Structures are given as structure tokens and as C-alpha cells.
Image (cartoon, helix red, strand yellow):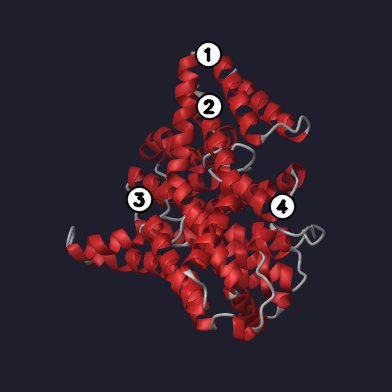
Amino acid sequence: MPLTITLLGILTLIALISWVRLHTFLAFLAVSVGVGLALGLKPLAIVDAIQKGIGGTLASITAIIALGAMLGKLVAQSGAAERIASSMMGLVGTRHARWAFMVTGFIVGLPLFYSVGFMLLAPLVITVAYRYKLPALYIGLPMLASLSVTQGYLPPHPAPLAILKQFNANMGLTLFYGILVSIPAILVSGALFGSTLKRYTNLPNPAFIAPNLETHQTPSTAVSFLTVLFPILLIGISTLISPFLPTNSWQQQTLLFMGEPIVSMFLAVVLASFTLGLWRGKTMPEVTALFGDAIKDVAMLFLIFGGAGALKQVLTDGGVNQSIADLMQHSTLHPYVLAWGMAALIRVCVGSSTVSGITTAGFVTPLLATSGVEPNLMVLSIGAGSMMFSHVNDTGFWLFREYFQLSMADTLKTWSIMETLVSVSGLAGVMTLNWVLQ
């Protein structure tokens, strides 16, 4: 019954947004209340779930998205994005732009959360697409596939790391296996599937298209790359060096602090204010005005993300996770397939890959002792399942739709299918690796 209610709620949400043309945030609230009542939650419990869902979702992403938008705006308006794009095109040529972005997405995605990587790289994709008259989806989807794979499969991202610790798996071995599984998954979901999207020629969000500037008006290539990569460098240095420093020493604590996504993005915005703003002849009020415009560009996303978080929490409090787990607990499927399927179902119904992964881990932990399966591969199978078919209850769906300016139907045909391929390819990679290791 909870699964039927969830499915009807998701279909109603799609109908309200696509056909009734109701504002997305209002549609989320209406469906959240309806689904909550249908699941047997008391009215006040529904209100608490909505508030908790909105607060929890926005608490984790608001600052990162806002800072990312500010940095992206400066990168675009100063000409830094154009300078980076020109350098990339000069190095690999327009024919290989999508491959360059795919590799960049994987490298950037290793230390960065998905939203941070997206906010940094999406303006570069949009700038290249606009300047060189290339389909934005065609060159951008491989990069997004890389970011999704690293977010779902590889520690130290939140869900894989939490699952790894719960299973007492080996960090280095899980990361090694994860990279082996990631490569074919990215090639299938990003390079192969992305090559079919040339027909999507609509312009992406113009807010992140850099103005035409002469070369002498733009910052140098070195300054442009340094500013864009600065948060990545901070997080990368923190990740690589902090484990080798004395525990709780001031050096380790300082590195860990600077490696936090919010802190690294804030420091990057401060640096960009000088390198791309004040040192380029802009005044502080002009830089501040650009920041204000950047917030306006993404303000609607906050409401959409909050609405998605509200629905996710209502479904969680309504017991949808438990219903899925109970349904699959007595299955005769292979443990990796079972864990993947459970994570996939929770992901589709609830929308959060993190919730999906951590919830599934709690139910399959006994399988590790009774089946003797490899815990490192179990981390990857759950991670792959947690990426299944992102749709209207996932904040990433709306981030992609707003940046690339697609209809609901086209977003489902592109983004959602790409995420599904990420998930299925990941399971195939885990099963193949399991066969090789046996």
C-alpha cells in the first residue's frame, strides 16, 4: 500500500507541474500533505515532516549553492570562463570537448560534493556551448555522469563513506574497486548515451553565459584556472594530507576546516572578488551587485529544493523505506542484486541517494555475515542502486532542469535516463568484478 500511495503521489506531482502548471513549490506542498494523509500520518506530524524536510534539505545545500552561484557569476562575467573555455578548445578542439569535460568531471568529483562540482563546472559547459555553437547537453552530460558516479560510488562522499564504515570495509580497496567500476559506468551513461543528445539544441540558462570580451579584457589563463580550481585544491589538500597529521592537532584541524565545502567555497568567492573583480578594475559595489544578481538567478531553486525535501521527509516518516525493505527481505536474489534493488526502490520513492544508501545498508548488514560477500563490493552495489532514476523528488533533477532550460519531459528523457544508466552500469560492473575476483 505505501508503494502504491507513493507512486500515485509522484504521478500527481508530475501532473500538477506539467499539465495544471501549478508552481512547483506549491505542487510539492500539496502532494506532501496528500501523501502524508494517505500514509496515515497525523496532520501535525505532516507539518513537522514538511518543516523538517525543508530545513534539512536547505541546511545542507543553501550556502553551497549560493556561494557556487556567486563564484559562477564572477567567473562568467569577468571572462574567466571564456578564457578557460578557449584554452580547453585550443588544447583538445571542439570535436573532443565532451571528453575533456568528462575527465574534468571525474577529477573534480573525487573531492567535491555533487552540488559544488555542478556549480563550478556548469557555467564552463554553458560558456563553451554558447561560444562554439555546440549542443549544451551533448558536451555537458558526460561531465554530469562523472559527477554522479563519484557522488554515488566513491568515498569520501557522504553515503558511500557512511556505508563503508557500517560494513567495516577497507577505504583504499573500496576506492580502487570503485574507480574500476566507475570508468565503464561513465563511458556508458555519459559518453555513449550523451552522444545521442545532439538534437537538444536549446540554449541553456543565459544567466551563466559570459559576455563577449576581448582577450585583453579577460583575466589570464593561470588566474582563471587558479580561481576556479581553488576550492578543489583546498579540499584535495585536506583529503590527502590531513590523515597523515597527528590526530586533533591544530594543523589537522586547520586543514579539515579549510577542506569543508562551505569554507572552501567561501574562500574561493573571496579570492575571486579580488582576482576577477577588484584587480580587474571593478569596484566593491559592482562586485556585490553581481553577487546579488547571482542569488536572484538561483532563488527559485531554493523553493524547489525545499519542496523536494518536504516530500522526501513525508515519505520517510510514512514508513515507505521500511515497506520496501520488508518487501525484499526474504528475496532469493544474489546479495549484491538484492542490495542494489532495495537501494534503487528507496531512491525512486524517496528521492535522496544518501537516504537510500544509508537505509539499505542497515537492512543488508546481516547479509555480510551470512553470505560471505565482499563488503567493499557491497558498498558499491548499494551506491549504484542509490543513483537509480532521479526524478521530480530529487533536487539534482531540478538543478539540471533549471541550468539547461529543459521541459519536464526532456529532463526525464535525458537526466533521468542518464542516472538510470549510471545505476545499472554500476551493478553490471560490480557483478563483473565479483566474477573476476572469485
Q: Is residue 438 visible?
A: no
Residue 100 shows which numbered tag? none
Q: Which residue is mark 4?
A: 405
Residue at x 53%, y 52% (from the top left corner)? 430
Q: CA distance from mark 3 to mark 4?
A: 41 Å
Q: CA distance from mark 4 to mark 2?
A: 28 Å
Residue at x 62%, y 43% (from the top left corner)? 390
Type of the residue with mark 4: Gln
Q: Which residue is mark 1?
A: 40
Which quadrant of the view contains residue 7?
top right
Q: Are marks 3 and 4 in contact (CB under 8 Å)?
A: no
Q: Which residue is mark 2?
A: 315
Horizontal and vertical percent position of residue 138: 73, 63
Horizontal and vertical percent position of residue 55: 44, 35
Type of the residue with mark 3: Ala
Q: CA distance from mark 2 to mark 1?
A: 11 Å
Q: Earlier in the sequence, mark 4 or mark 1?
A: 1
Residue at x 59%, y 77% (from the top left corner)? 84
Q: Are marks 4 and 2 in contact (CB under 8 Å)?
A: no
67 in relation to 301, above or below: below
Q: CA distance from mark 2 to mark 3?
A: 30 Å
Horizontal and vertical percent position of residue 191: 68, 64
